[in-house]
Structures are given as structure tokens and as C-alpha cells.
Amino acid sequence: MIGTLINVAAIIIGGLLGILLGSRLQERVRSTVMAGLGLFTLAYALQQFFGTTNALVVLGALIAGALLGEWWQIENGLARLGRWLEIRLGVQNDEPLELQNGQKSRFVRGFLTASLLFCIGPMAILGSIQDGLTGDSSTLIIKAVLDGFASLAFASTLGVGVLFSSLIILVYQGAISLLAVQVQSFFTPIMMSEMSATGGVILMAVAINSLLEIKQIRAGNFLPALIIAPILAMIFLQ
């Protein structure tokens, strides 16, 4: 849960800074900072992968996970969920922010837009599982930095509603971490190390796709590999 709490704090701090700074943060500064975060995420992901005791286990998990993910269309499912929530809850519309009850409309749009961005993605799931199983909050701390910066940008235009998206993060990621704690007793150190190494490769996909924008990769479709990796480790490495 520590990683989730740090993530929540980062969103609140970033949102407060965004409200104070407004739109004074230049786009070129934002893009350069995001590139730096992408490079750091890539380096950290490589470090995680190097913790594997057998790279073939990671490879097998990724291939099997990718096949399952493509079959189940996890990435498209996450995208459809986000779009459905946007339409259902009225995040995207052609109305101006300032309606008769302008402050309420602006608050709701900021809250929902930020909540969708922070929750719909592989880093939230991957980081929460790692935090719950191993106590390693590193992935969620990286996500916290990214979310904090995004929160700053959103709050500068959509206002205080962005801050309250931290409540959704607390419940969502906290629930995943607590669920992972319940199965912790079944995982050996080798199983955990292979899961973390596999997670590192998925994290590389996130960095290349979303942060550095080098190549489009459906990172969400690799998520089943997080379950397959410890199973393969249990069968072949124990």
C-alpha cells in the first residue's frame, strides 16, 4: 500500500501546483520532462529484467501472455472501458466548461478525466501487484512521478476536480495490492523474481509506447504474462 499512498500524494501535490501555476508551464518543458521520465523508466525496467534467474521463463511467459492478451483483447478492452466511461459519465462533450453551474461541470470533467488516465493502464495493475506481493513500490513510485506531472497539467486547465481523482487511485490500486497480499504465501522468491523480471519487460513496453513514443506497443496485452511467469518458474525452476 505504500506505493499507492505515494501515488495519491503525488497526484495531490501535482494538482495543487497545477492550480497555482495555471498554464504557465510551457509545452516544450513538459515534453522534455516526459522524455526524461521515459528514459528513466526504460533504465529501471532493464534493471528489473536483469533480476531473472532464467530468461527463457520470462520469454515463455511473454509469448504465452501475449497470445492470451491478443485473444482476450485486453488493450482494446481497457480502451473501450475508458471510452465507455467517458461517454457514460459525460467527460467528453461539446459543451463549454462554464455552464450555468460551470464550477460543477468543470470539477466533474477534471475528476473523471484524471481518474481514467491514472487507472486505465498496465502500470497501475503491474505496480499494485508488485507492491502487494513483494513490497517493492518502485514501479508505483515511477507511476506517481508520471501521475504527479500529468496532474499538474490537468489541474492547470480543469481545476480542483483533478485532486479528487486521488480517491479513486487509493481504492483501485489499494484493492489490487491487498488482493495480491492474500496470495503472497503461495509465492516463492524465485517465482517473485521471475514475475518482477517479466514486469520489467512490460514496463519497457510502456516506456517505449506511451512515454518515449518510439513505437506503438499494446502493452496491456502482455499483462497475462504476470500470472504465467510464476507458474513457469514453479514448474521448471523449483
Image: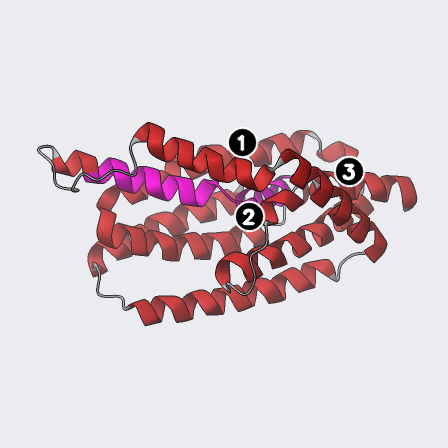
Q: Which residue is mark 3?
A: 187
Side (left or right) of 57 relative to 203: right
Provide residue 74's location: percent of width, then percent of height: 59, 38
**Magenta stretch prevailing secondary structure:** helix
Q: Earlier in the sequence, mark 2 or mark 1?
A: 2
The numbered dot on residue 175 is 1
**The residue under label 1 is which amino acid type?**
Ala
Query: Is 127 in the magenta?
Result: yes
Dot 3: element:
loop
Marked residue nearer the N-terminal end (3 or 2): 2
Q: Is residue 211 above or below residue 78?
A: below
Secondary element under disc 2, as helix, strand or loop, is helix
SS of the residue under disc 1: helix
Left-right relation of 44 to 25: right
Q: In this orientation, which residue lies closer to the viewer: 207 or 182?
A: 207
Q: Nearer the viewer, mark 3 or mark 2?
A: 2
Q: Is residue 5 above or below residue 184?
A: below
Q: Are marks 3 and 1 in contact (CB under 8 Å)?
A: no
Which residue occupies the foreground of this view, 66 or 148?
66
The 10 Å Cα crowd at callout 3, few under 14, some 14 to 19, many 20 or more, is some
Q: Which residue type does callout 3 highlight?
A: Phe
Q: What span is colored magenta in the figure?
A: 106-132
How far apart are the two marked residues, 3 and 2, measured between alpha carbons?
21 Å
Q: Earlier in the sequence, mark 3 or mark 1?
A: 1
